[in-house]
Image: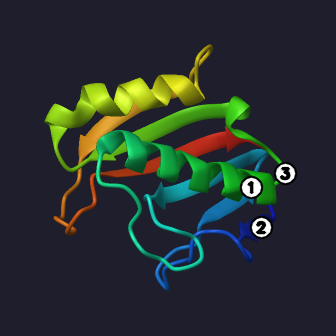
Amino acid sequence: MPREIISGNGLPKPSPYFSPAVKCAGLVFVSGTGPYDPVTGTLVGSTIQEQTSRALGNIASILEAAGTSLDKAVSATVILANEEEFAGMNEEWLKWFPVDPPARHGAKLPVKVPGLKISIAMIVEA
């Protein structure tokens, strides 16, 4: 089964260790995506709501480059630095997924990155 690496201008800068997303078998697998400005690579937002919005905006851009969108999201893994910020994250999440949200799993960030509150990975229908 062929796979396509999703990358390009205006998308979050890829790590040398993984691709922003891979399209294969009718699905798009989006790597953990944080609240970074796609041009400068700097962290955006000081609140969990701001960071959730930026991370989801970054994912939306990746999905657009892959020819799909957030409304086709099947599953998401939300990784938080602080579990106590779940309610704030969920408040912003519901703005992006007001009906029929994807299945979701939560976890805690395994490594402290200064200022980073959230990372989101997703599986989306191509």
Q: Label 3: which residue?
A: 67
Depth check, mark 3 against mark 2: the one in front is 3
Answer whether labels 3 and 1 touch (C-beta < 8 Å): no
Element carrying mark 1: strand
Which residue is disc 2 drawn over? Answer: 4
Q: Residues within 10 Å of mark 3 (few under 14, many from 20)?
A: few
Q: Which residue is drawn at 51% across and 74% down?
A: 18
Q: How crowded is mark 1: few (under 14 residues within 10 Å), some or many (20 or more)?
A: some
Mark 3 or 2, nearer chain start: 2
x 41%, y 62%: residue: 44
Q: Residue furthest top?
A: 99
Position above or below: 79 against 10: above
Q: Is 61 located above or below residue 17 in the figure?
A: above
At x 42% / y 74%, what residue is drawn?
Answer: 42
Q: Earlier along the polypeptide chain: callout 2 or callout 1?
A: 2
Tag 3, which secondary structure? loop
